[in-house]
Image: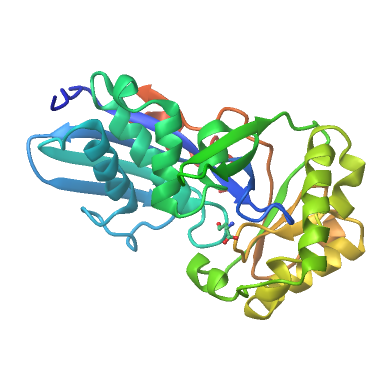
C-alpha cells in the first residue's frame, strides 16, 4: 500500500556524535549536546532545502542534499515517495571534522521521512531505522548514538543489519571536543588503514575496548588506559599530525584523549585543564552527553530550534 502523508511539518533535533572512543573502532560511540535541527514537510512538487549555520552556501540545496537522500531511501522503505519536499536545516555540527555531521543528516532524514508517513512507525520500526541509517552511512558507530543518545555499542548481525545497545554513562565522564579548522574526510582516513594488523595489537585493543565499557559506566578513573588504541589512530596520525600531537600531549598529561571518529577533532573524556587547550586554529567546546538521541516533534523550527546557544554551540 502506498503511504499517506502527514500534511503538517515535522522536525527533529539530532546530536553530534563521536565514534570509536579510542579502541572501539566502528563499534563504540557517544552522543554530545551539540545539535542540528531539521524540519521537513510535503510539498505539491519539487525539492527545496534551506540551510543556515554550518554548511550554508556550501551544501547542495536539492535532491543531492544528504538529508533528502536519506529521506528518499526511507520513503522507498516506507512504500513510496511524496510529490514534493521542503527541508529546513539549522546546522551547528561542524562538517567533516569527525563529529558525525553526516550521520546526523542521515538520522534526521530517516526519522523525518518516517514521521511524515501517517503509519510510519508501523512501516519502519526503530530497529529498521537503525539498520537503514547504518547502511546509508556505511558503519553504525555514529548513527547508533545519534538515534539512541548516550554511549552505544553497535555491531552488525550476520545478515549485515546493524544493532546497538545503550550504556549508562557515569557522571564523571565530561567530554570536551577540540575542533581544528582543517577538515578531514572519513573515506581518506579509512583508506589509510591496513588490511591486516598484528595479532598483538588486536589483542590489546580487544582488552582496552572491554575495559572502556567498564570505565565509561562504572569507573572513569580507568579512562586513560581504557582509551588506548592500536588499530586506527596510529595509521591515521601522519594524515593529521596536529591532531595526533594534541592527543599525545593530552594523554601525557593524564587526560583521556582520543581522535573523534575519523578525525581531525580530538575528544577528551576527562576534563582538559585550560593550560592544555590548543590555541590558534582550534575551537574548544566543553559539552555534556546527550541522553535523548534524535527527538522528533510536530511543526516547523521555532525560536528555540534556531537559537545557536541553546543548542550547545558557542556563538
Ligand atoms: N568508525 C569510523 C571510522 C567513524 O573511524 O572510520 C567515522 O566517523
Where residue 104 appears, x then y in whole percent? 46, 45
Q: Residue at x 19, y 47 (%)?
A: 48
The residue closer to the viewer here, 199 or 315, is: 199
Q: Residue at x 75, y 32 (%)?
A: 169
In this picture the colour scheme is rainbow
Where residue 300 appears, x then y in whole percent? 31, 29
Count of numbered tags: 0
Where residue 92 appears, x then y in whole percent? 49, 48
Q: From this viewpoint, is residue 314 visible?
A: no
Q: Residue at x 15, y 22 (%)?
A: 4
Answer with the quarter of the image where residue 261 lies: bottom right
* Left or right, residue 254 beside residue 39: right
Residue positioned most to the left: 44
Residue positioned most to the front: 158
Where residue 197 appears, x then y in whole percent? 71, 71
Would you place residue 174 above or below residue 165 in this image? below
The residue closer to the viewer here, 157 or 132, is: 157
Q: Residue at x 48, y 59 (%)?
A: 95
Q: Quadrant of the N terminus?
A: top left
* Left or right, residue 236 beside residue 118: right
Question: In the image, ligand 1 is in what quadrant?
Answer: bottom right
* Left or right, residue 41 beside residue 278: left
Q: From this viewpoint, is residue 197 visible?
A: yes
Residue positioned most to the bottom: 238
Answer with the quarter of the image where residue 130 lies: top left
Amino acid at each position: 500500500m502506498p503511504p499517506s502523508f502527514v500534511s503538517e511539518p515535522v522536525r527533529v533535533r539530532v546530536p553530534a556524535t563521536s565514534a570509536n572512543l579510542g579502541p572501539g573502532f566502528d563499534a563504540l560511540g557517544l552522543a554530545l549536546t551539540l545539535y542540528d535541527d531539521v524540519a521537513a514537510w510535503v510539498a505539491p512538487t519539487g525539492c527545496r532545502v534551506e540551510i543556515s549555520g554550518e554548511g550554508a552556501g556550501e551544501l547542495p540545496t536539492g535532491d543531492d542534499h544528504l538529508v533528502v537522500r536519506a529521506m528518499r531511501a526511507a520513503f522507498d522503505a516506507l512504500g513510496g515517495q511524496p510529490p514534493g519536499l521542503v527541508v529546513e536545516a539549522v546546522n551547528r555540527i561542524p562538517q567533516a571534522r569527525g563529529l558525525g555531521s553526516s550521520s546526523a543528516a542521515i538520522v534526521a532524514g530517516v526519522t523525518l521521512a518516517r514521521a511524515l508517513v501517517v503509519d510510519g512507525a508501523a512501516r519502519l520500526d526503530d530497529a529498521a531505522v537503525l539498520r537503514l541509517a547504518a547502511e546509508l552511512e556505511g558503519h553504525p558507530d555514529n548513527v547508533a548514538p545519534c538515534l539512541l543518545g548516550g554511549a552505544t555499542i553497535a555491531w552488525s548481525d550476520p545478515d549485515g543489519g546493524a544493532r546497538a545497545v545503550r550504556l549508562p554513562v557515569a557522571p564523571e565522564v565530561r567530554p570536551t571536543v577540540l575542533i581544528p579548522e582543517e577538515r578531514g574526510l572519513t573515506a581518506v582516513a579509512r583508506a589509510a588503514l591496513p588490511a591486516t594488523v598484528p595479532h598483538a595489537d588486536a589483542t590489546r585493543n580487544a582488552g582496552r575496548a572491554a575495559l572502556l565499557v567498564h570505565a565509561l559506566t562504572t569507573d572513569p578513573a580507568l579512562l586513560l588506559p581504557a582509551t588506548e588504541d592500536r588499530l586506527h589512530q596510529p595509521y591515521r596520525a601522519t594524515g593529521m599530525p596536529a591532531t595526533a600531537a594534541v592527543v599525545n600531549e593530552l594523554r601525557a598529561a593524564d587526560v583521556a584523549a582520543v581522535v573523534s571518529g575519523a578525525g581531525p577533532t580530538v575528544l577528551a573524556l576527562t576534563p582538559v585543564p585550560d593550560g592544555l587547550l590548543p590555541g590558534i586554529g582550534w575551537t574548544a567546546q566543553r559539552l555534556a552527553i546527550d541522553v535523548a538521541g534524535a527527538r522528533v516533534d510536530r511543526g516547523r523550527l521555532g525560536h528555540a530550534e534556531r537559537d545557536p546557544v541553546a543548542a550547545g554551540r558557542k556563538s
